[in-house]
Amino acid sequence: MTTQAKFLHPLLSCLLVWSCISAALAEDFSCEESGETAIWISPLTPKADAQIKIMAVSTDGPLAVLALIDSQGRRLPLQYRRRGGPPWALISSLEALNAGDYRVVAGRDGEQTACRPLIIGRSGTEESPKVWGLATEAFYSAWIEELFGAPLKEVIRFHSLEPVLQNTERNFLHSYLGINEDKGLSLTPDCADLPYILRAYFAWKVGLPIAFRSCGRGSADAPPRCEAATIKTEFTQNIKSQATFRNVCRELVNIVHSGSARTGLEDEDTDLYPIPLSRETLWPGTVFADPYGHVLMLVEWIPQMADRPGILLGVDAQPDSTVTRKPFWEGSFQFADIQGAGPGFKVFRPLVRKSTGEWRILSNGELIDNPGFAPFSLEQAQLSPDDFYARMTKLMNPSGLIYPKQTYEATLNALVEQIEARVTSVDNGETYLRNNPGQIIPMPNGSAIFQTIGPWEDYATPARDMRLIIAINVLNGLPQKIVRYPELFVLKDQSPEGVREEIEQHHSKLTKERSIRYTRTDGSLWELTVAEVLARKPDFEMAYNPNDCPEIRWGAKPGTEEYSTCRRHSPTEQREKMEQYRIWFREVRRPAQ
C-alpha cells in the first residue's frame, strides 16, 4: 500500500464532510496554540501503525473542526466525539498512519484556533516543561470527563479504580509515556484518596508537580488544620516509571484523609480552596467536601432538556474500593453549615514555578483574580443548605423552571442507585466473611465507627447508611419542598398545595413499582420494593455492622420468611454500642472525629 493510500484509507469516511473546512482555514499553515485552545496527543511518541489519540480542549467556546494535515499540505477532517462545556473537547483517534510529519489543527467559524505537530516514527521536538495553568487544568478536566463518561442510563460502578484506568477507550493517558507503565497498575483509593490519586496520575503522565499536606480531623467547634505542604516534583524530571508513581501514591495515601478536604473555607494552608458556584467554574475534576467526612468529584454536566431536568454527575469511592457515578442531589452531596468543617465545592490549590526553578503554592489572595485558575471565593460560606441546593438547582436548569414530576422521578432514580450501591457493599462484606469463616470483625468505639482501618472500614457501612437515611428524608420531603420553593417549579395553574398532593400520590405509586434485590445468607435473592426500603428507615440506624447477616442489614424482622435464612449476629457488646450510637443516625448528626 502506498503512503498516500495508507494515509487516506482510515479517513475515507470523513470525505463527505470535506466542505466543512473553509478556504481560510485550509490556507493557514501556522502551527501555534492559543491560550484558550490546546491540542494533546497520546502517546507522547507516536509510532507508525499504532493507535494515536487526539484531544483538542478549549476554554472559550465549542470547537467545530478537527483536522489532520500531512507533510504535503493535504488536509482531511477527523471524526470526533464532543465532550464538556466548559471546558469543551473534541476527541478522536487515528489508526495505521505512516511514519512522517503531520499537523493536527482545531478551529471554529472558519478560523484556526490551535495547531499541534504530530511526528510519527521518530523522536520529535523536545517537550517543553509543563506547568499548572489554564491549558493543563482544562486538559485535566476533559480527561476526567472522558474517564467516567457514559450514557446517562448506563450504570457506572467499578470494583476499584483499576478497571477505569486500564480501559484504553476511557483513559486518554493509558500508556501515554510509552514505557508500558500501566501494566499491572492496581489502585484502590477510598473517597478521600480518589481525587488525590487521579490528580497524581495525571501529573505523572503529563510531567507536573503535586502537593499534599498532613491534616488533623478537626472537632465539633473547628475544621481540620494542616501542616506545611509536601511538594513532589519527581514527575517534572523526565519520564518516570510506575515504581516512582507508586512510591508517591504510597506516601500520599498514608497522609491524606477526609479531613484534608474539610478544611476551613478561609484557611490558606490547605490542599483545596473554595470556588464560586457557577457553570464557568464547576468543571469536571472539582472536589466536593461533605462536612460529615465524605468526598466526591464532579465528572460531567448533562444539559437540561424539555423532558428532563439538568443533571450534574459525580463519582466517589468507598472503603471497599468500589467507584460509582452518581447524580448531584441532597442525598449524595451533603451540604451543612457547621463549625467543624468547611464544606462545598473546591479545587486543588495550584503550584507555580518561581524564577529559581522551585515551586510554590498560590495563596487565596493570589487566586481571586488570577486568569489561569478558578477564582477563590467565600460565596458558599454565606449560603444556608436550602439556599445552596436552590442555587445548584438553578445552575443545572438554566432554562428556567422544572416540572415537579421530573424532579421527583430524578430524585427517586438517584435514591434507587444509592440503594443498589449499598447492595454491592453488603455483598462485599458477605464475601469477606464467607472467605474468613468464624471471624468477628472488631468494632471501634464512638465516632471511630465512621473512620478507622482494616475490615471494619472496608465492610461496615455507617457513613453510607447515614447518607441513605438523609436520602430517604430528601425523597419523602420533596412534596413539601414544592410548597416552600414554588419559584423553582412549573406549577401551571395549580397551587403549590395541589401539586404537593399530586406528587405524594405519584410517590405512593412509584415506590411500590420500583424494587431492588439483595442476596440472603443462603444465596437466594430477596426482593424489596422501594416503599419497603423507605418504611425500614429506622432499621438502617443499626444495619451497618458486617458481623450481622444480610437479612438484618436490610431490616428483615425475626419470625418472617425473609429473616428465616439469617445465620449470623453481631456480638452482644457490639449491639449495645450500636444502641448508644443510634441517636446519631436518627438525628442524622455525625459526631466530630
Image (cartoon, rainbow, N blue to C red):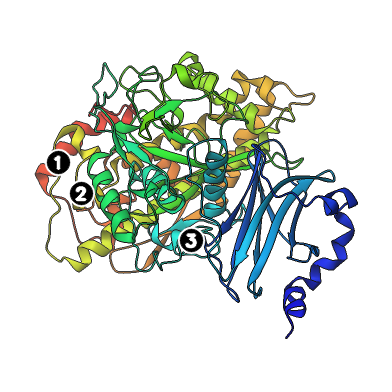
Which one is closest to the eye, mark 3 or mark 2? Answer: 3
Numbered circle sitting on residue 444: 1
Given the image, on which type of amino acid does mark 1 rest? Pro
| Quadrant of residue 436 within the rendered picture | bottom left
Location of mark 3 (residue): 176
Which residue is nearer to you in this view: 377 or 358? Answer: 358
For label 3, the crowd category at 10 Å Cα-Cα, with few meaning under 14, some 14 to 19 and many 20 or more, is: many
Which one is closest to the eye, mark 3 or mark 1? Answer: 3
| Above or below, 250 relative to 586 | below
Which residue is nearer to you in this view: 505 or 440? Answer: 440
> Which quadrant: the C terminus?
top left
Which residue is nearer to you in this view: 158 or 461? Answer: 158
Helix, strand or loop under label 2: helix
* Residue at 85% across, 61% down: 17
Helix, strand or loop under label 3: loop
Numbered circle sitting on residue 456: 2
* Residue at 49% across, 20% down: 380
| Above or below, 494 relative to 503 | above
| Quadrant of residue 309 within the rendered picture | top right
The alpha-carbon separation of the residues under discs 2 and 1 comes to: 8 Å
The alpha-carbon separation of the residues under discs 3 and 2 comes to: 37 Å
User: Is residue 557 in view from this perspective?
Assistant: no
Measured as percent of width and height from the top left, residue 86 is found at: 64, 38
